[in-house]
Image (spheres, rainbow, N blue to C red):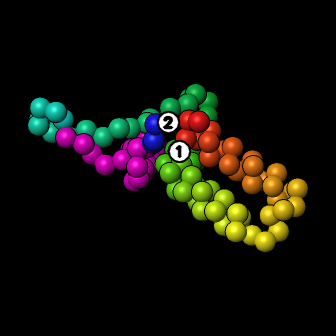
Amino acid sequence: MKHTPKPWKTINMDGRYFPSVLIGKPQPYSDGSGKYQARIVVNESHDSQMKTIQANARLIASSPDLLEALKEAVNWIKRTPDLDSPKAKLKLNKLEQLITKVEGG
């Protein structure tokens, strides 16, 4: 299963409400009555600092971009001449395992 494509963006970052992450583009309701958009509300303990909650929302919203950058890095590393070293292979393996984890494999 693939994740919802970009854009993912943060809203409610002014500190009055818990930050949210809007996932993908708005989609029409099946009955044509309007549109909806998937949303993650980043709601943590009231003891958490709002700056921490906002940082977590930004991290969640950045996830598709981070995965894309990770895949690009793996492709670049595979073209590196020094890939035969054990250290390079270990790092590449770790990155590939992370991609598999993110993609649900």
Seen at 61% across and 30% down, the residue is 47
Which quadrant of the structure image shows residue 12? top left
Q: Earlier in the sequence, mark 2 or mark 1?
A: 2
Q: What stretch is highlighted in magenta?
A: 4-28
Q: Mark 2 points at which residue?
A: 42
**Residue at the (68%, 49%) spot, across then down:** 96
Residue 15: % across, % down: 47, 44
Inspect the magenta stretch and tell me whether residue 21 lies in it: yes
Residue at horizontal 62 percent and vertical 38 percent from the top: 101
Q: In this view, does 55 lie above or below 88?
A: above
Residue 29 lies, in percent from the top left, at 18, 35
In contact (CB < 8 Å): disc 2 and disc 1: yes
> Which residue is rendered at x = 31% and y = 49% of the image?
25
As drawn, the residue found furthest toward the right would be: 86
Q: What distance separates the C-alpha of mark 2 from that of mark 1?
A: 9 Å
**Amino acid type of the residue tagged 1 in the rendering:** Ile
State the quadrant of the C terminus: top right
Indicate which label's residue lies in the foreground, 2 or 1.
Answer: 1
